[in-house]
């Protein structure tokens, strides 16, 4: 059975260690945040270090994961920007999934975060503090 998270993000994501099954992020009491960002977006580049510090301080103890959904214009831009991120990411080549998620969740600006459990998604505005 495909979880709602797999239905949204596909079967696999990437991490610093390589491919990871999307299903490994799901489970009771676990939360997944989607971070829509791009290297060419100055507010995004300003917020990413704050989100990284929060993530590194709280991810394990708070039972949440972040998935970077890139709006970069090339795989090289994605790789350069993602190199400084400790969380998972939707692979850059899965543009069809990125476009579908953006449309479904009405993401038209960048530096936006969406978070929720398996059955709900809440919109946040993480320009100053993460919505976790």
Image: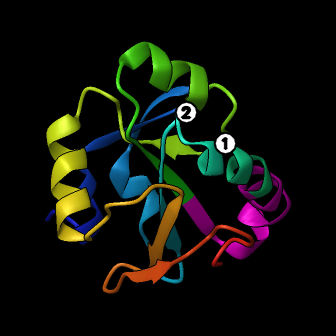
Q: In the figure, is residue 30 to the left or right of 101?
A: right
Contact? badges 1 and 2 (CB < 8 Å): yes
Q: If you read the primary sequence from the N terminus, does the residue marked by circle 1 or circle 2 appear first?
A: 2
Q: Position of residue 57 (x, y in %)?
A: 86, 60
Q: Quadrant of residue 95?
A: top left
Q: Residue at x 52, y 74 (%)?
A: 31
In the rendered image, which residue does mark 1 sit on? 45
Q: Position of residue 99 (x, y in %)?
A: 19, 48
In the rendered image, which residue does mark 2 sit on? 39
Q: Is residue 19 above or below residue 89?
A: above
Q: Quadrant of the C terminus?
A: bottom right
**Label 1: element kind:** helix
Q: Quadrant of residue 105?
A: bottom left
Q: Residues within 10 Å of mark 1 (few under 14, many from 20)?
A: some
* Stretch of the chain drawn in magenta: 51-65
Q: In the rendered image, is residue 1 in sight?
A: yes
Q: Residue at x 55, y 57 (%)?
A: 66
Q: Position of residue 121 (x, y in %)?
A: 37, 81
Instruction: Tell which of 44 and 90 is nearer to you.
Output: 44
Q: Is residue 69 above or below residue 33?
A: above
Query: What is the spatial separation of the Cα atoms under label 1 and label 2, in whole angstroms?
Result: 6 Å
**Label 2: element kind:** loop
Q: Residue at x 53, y 83 (%)?
A: 29
Q: Is residue 56 above or below residue 19?
A: below
């Amino acid at each position: 059975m495909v979880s709602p998270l797999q239905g949204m993000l596909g079967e696999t994501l990437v991490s610093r260690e390589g491919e990871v099954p999307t299903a490994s992020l799901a489970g009771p009491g676990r939360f997944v945040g989607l971070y829509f960002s791009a290297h060419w977006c100055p507010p995004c580049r300003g917020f990413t270090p704050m989100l990284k510090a929060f993530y590194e301080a709280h991810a394990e103890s708070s039972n949440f994961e972040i998935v970077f959904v890139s709006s970069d214009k090339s795989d090289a831009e994605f790789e350069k920007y993602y190199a400084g991120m400790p969380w998972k990411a939707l692979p850059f080549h899965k543009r069809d999934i990125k476009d579908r998620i953006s449309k479904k969740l009405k993401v038209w600006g960048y530096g936006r975060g969406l978070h929720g459990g398996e059955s709900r998604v809440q919109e946040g505005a993480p320009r100053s503090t993460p919505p976790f």
